[in-house]
Amino acid sequence: MTKVGVVGGGGGAGNGGAGGGTLTILAEGGVSISGSIVAVGQPADDTTGCAGGGGGGGAGGIVIVASKSKVTIGGSIDVSGGDGGPALGYFVPGGGGGGGIVHVFAPTIDATGTVNT
């Protein structure tokens, strides 16, 4: 069973970036990730010139549960926050969005890939 949702917070002042989404995978058997799972926060939009740089969007989260077998992560999981916008005029730059969470629950976890938070 998989469940996709929206969780990451959007950036603040200016034109802040959108937050990342969520993904939950619940499996009785094994789970193998050979591609990419991405739930990143988006960077702030710096094209408007109002109120300085907006904040980057916060990342989302990934939860993987394989109750009776193993999880193999050979690909990549990315839940990094978005970049803040640049300083505009006398306004300060926006801050970057916070990194998300990755929870993996299984009797055995074989991680040879990458996880970015």
Image (cartoon, rainbow, N blue to C red):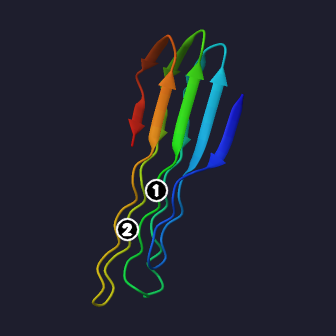
> Which residue sits at x=42%, y=49%?
80
Number of the front mark, 2 or 1? 1
Query: Residue shown at 30%/85% (left/top)?
Result: 91
Task: Specify which label sits upstream in the sequence, 2 or 1.
Answer: 1
| Label 2 packing within 10 angstroms: few (<14), some (14-19), many (20+) | many
SS type, badge 2:
loop
Q: Could you say which is closer to the camera, residue 59 or residue 32?
A: 59
Q: In this view, does 98 lie to the left or right of 28?
A: left
Q: What residue type is labelled 2?
A: Gly
> Residue 104, percent across and down?
49, 25
Instruction: Name the residue rendered at 46%, 45% in the picture.
Output: 79
Q: Distance between the residues labelled 2 and 1?
A: 10 Å
Q: Circle 2 sits on which residue?
A: 84
Quadrant of image for the C terminus: top left
Instruction: State the quadrant of the N terminus.
Output: top right
The x and y percentages for residue 69 are: 58, 10
Above or below — where is 67 with respect to 80?
above
Query: Residue at 36% across / 62% down in the picture?
Result: 96
What label does residue 58 carry, if any? 1
Mark 1 belongs to which amino acid? Gly
96 vs 23: above or below: below
Residue 107, x across and y down, in percent: 50, 10
Q: In this view of the protein, which residue sits in the foreground, 74 or 94?
A: 94
